[in-house]
Image (spheres, rainbow, N blue to C red):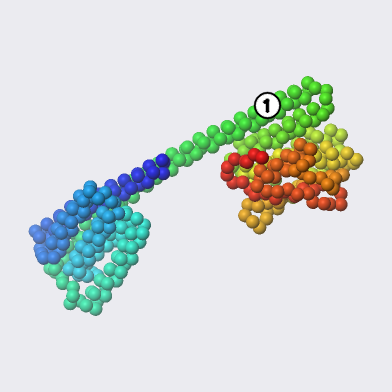
Amino acid sequence: MKKNTVNHDRIDNKLKLLRKFNYTSSTLSLIFALLCLFIIDVYGTIPFVFCLYAGLNFLNTYLFRYHNNLTTMAINTSILSWTSTMVICLCSGGITSPFIFILAIIVLAGYVSTQLFGQIYLYLVLASIIILFFVSNYFPNFIPDDVPEKSKDLFSLASILFAVYLLGWIFGKNLLETHHSLYHSKTEIEKRIDEKDTLLREVHHRVKNNLQTVSSLLNLQSKNTDNQQIKELIKGSQNRVLSMAMIHEMLYLRQNLSKIEFKLYVHELTDFLVQSLNSKQKNIHIDLDIPDIQLSVDSTIPLGLLINEAVTNSLKYGFVESNQGSIKISLQKENEQNTYSLRISDNGIGFPDDLDFSNSKSLGLKLIHNLARQLHGSIRRIKIEQGASYLVTFRDIEKGAIKTS
């Protein structure tokens, strides 16, 4: 609906400009014809062409009421203008005629219809100027000079005034009005964008606060039970909620409202998980090999949850027999556009060889498998000498909601 309104306004503006050009050029042509007959003492073809042009162009503008085709009217105007100008130039000195500058205005009138017609008229006018040059220099006998020697200065003055007034009153004024209109529209658009940015930041801020509230409620729930298994389940859900809250916090604190600095996010997330889950104060080192890239929110949320599950599994089950260890997270961009490989490894005790992500009874492993599918990617386990290693291949999701499994 908005696109149709914009197109209608654009056509309406073109119509107003073309009508203004037709009425003004036709009126000036009649005035020029009277000047030729009664002041400049130019008779014959030139005043006749001015009168003929004015009459036909008025008729062309009037007929628009019946065919209602802007392109047809613009083409007729350009053809009439070009033909009349060429005849007047040939009858007033050829390439040296002061009226030749009207050809430049014809090009501008051509662009009123479409860019294609404007380019056609541009090349037509260039060719016409070259033709006038060759005819004037090599076939001078074919150029009648209807302007008397004593009237050449007056004819030149009238031609220049005709061109300047037509160019300034029609196209110059329209260009200035268009500039003011574009400046006003640009200011309005910038104002609305600022308002939307402020609103969107507020939305992210509130989402972050709401997620933190949910995390606090889960924390309160965990304190009402003595069952350690339930406490761990609630703690896992709490960390998942906070991993999403971090994303919304980063969004409203930074300039870009659609992209996340992935390395910084993973650094903050893993630091939080180590502090939250490392109750026995083990020496667990997080090694990040992630380039400075920005990923979309739709990609970062499932990636954050996936990393949360993988790191949580490593911290809870990977180092039960050791007081120290390391977890490495690396990200590489593949040759295919927007495709990445995320590898998460640890040097803990690892998983059984027959482990299947999709059929595992572990909620964390099932989530990892489903989150990889949400990213339009895949996950597979890489066998290493010690520990566990996942390789997730995914595509950065630019737009749209995340698909649920």
- Residue pictured at 74% horizontal, 40% vertical: 366
- Looking at the image, residue 310 sits to the left or right of residue 147; the answer is right
Q: How many marks?
A: 1
Q: Quadrant of residue 319?
A: top right
Q: Nearer the viewer, residue 274 or 395?
A: 395
Mark 1: amino acid: Thr
Where residue 40 appears, as percent x and y from the top left, is 12, 61
Where residue 215 appears, as percent x and y from the top left, is 71, 28
- Residue pictured at 35% horizontal, 44% vertical: 9
For disc 1, the marked residue is 213
Q: Quadrant of residue 8?
A: top left
Quadrant occupied by the C terminus: top right
- Residue pictured at 78% horizontal, 33% vertical: 276
Q: Nearer the viewer, residue 209 or 183?
A: 209
- Looking at the image, residue 365 sits to the left or right of residue 322; the answer is left
Q: Quadrant of residue 85?
A: bottom left
Picture layout, residue 305 above or below residue 52:
above
Q: For the view shown, which residue lies furthest in the bottom direction? A: 138
Where residue 223 appears, as percent x and y from the top left, is 78, 23
Q: Nearer the viewer, residue 91 or 401?
A: 401
Q: For the view shown, which residue lies furthest in the front direction? A: 359
Quadrant occupied by the N terminus: top left
- Residue pictured at 73% horizontal, 39% vertical: 367
Q: Nearer the viewer, residue 282 or 190?
A: 282
Q: For the view shown, which residue lies furthest in the right direction? A: 321
- Looking at the image, residue 6 sits to the left or right of residue 289; the answer is left
- Can residue 401 be seen? yes
- Looking at the image, residue 289 sits to the left or right of residue 164; the answer is right
Where residue 37 appears, as percent x and y from the top left, is 10, 60
